[in-house]
Image (tube, grey):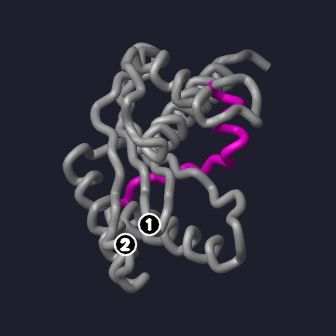
Amino acid sequence: MSRDCTVLGVDPGSRCTGYGIVSERSGQARLLETGTIRPVKDGPLSLRLGFIFGEISGLLERFAPDMVAVEDVFFARNSASALKLGQARGAILAACGMRDVAVFSYEPTLVKKSLVGTGRAEKDQVAFMVGQILGEKPNWARDSSDALAVAICHLNQRRYQQLCRRMPG
């Protein structure tokens, strides 16, 4: 039997970063908090990244998650957008590194497949499944829903790996 586990899921973005904290006990996931981190829209990138770092650091301090699951940068409209997403992701990883919290990365297609059964699922389908798993009506922002999906994906992967370790041979 696995012990309780709390995961901070993060959907990185330089303008809006979604987060969701999910706790699992005896295979039952429950929502602790979800929201978005929104730096000053037109502020310099360095200030936006610093704001993201500070907010993630605050969440790590408040909730003391066992681990963090972050969505990988999959694609962006252009290379400048991809670079900014990567830098936002870097601010998140740096905050985790400062608190010595393990970080796990997941491709968006794996997250979708883990929750919906297909890697090409629509965002509404993912949000619906997140709500079903958490027993909540998904009335949160899309970025929050994506972050919760990453956290749930990690919990699914964690359970699967624990089962594999217990298998003989």
Give the alpha-carbon distance from disc 1 to disc 2, as whole Å.
6 Å
Q: Nearer the viewer, residue 65 or 130?
A: 130
Contact (CB < 8 A) between labels 1 and 2?
yes
Residue 139 found in image quarter: top left
Residue visible at 75% across and 35% down? 119
Residue 53 occupies quadrant: bottom left
Residue 105 in picture, x, y percent from top left? 60, 51
Q: Position of residue 49 (x, y in %)?
A: 39, 75
Relative to 43, 112 lies left or right: right
- State the residue lying farthest toward the front: 42
Amino acid at the residue labelled 2:
Lys
Q: Residue 41: which numbered mark, if any?
A: 2
Q: Residues within 10 Å of mark 1 (few under 14, many from 20)?
A: many
Q: Mark 1 highlights which residue?
A: 15
- What crowding class fits label 2: few (fewer than 14 Cα within 10 Å), some (14-19), or many (20 or more)? few
Vertical side of 142 occupied by 162: above or below? above
Q: Residue at x 47, y 69 (%)?
A: 14
Q: Which residues are magenta?
A: 100-115
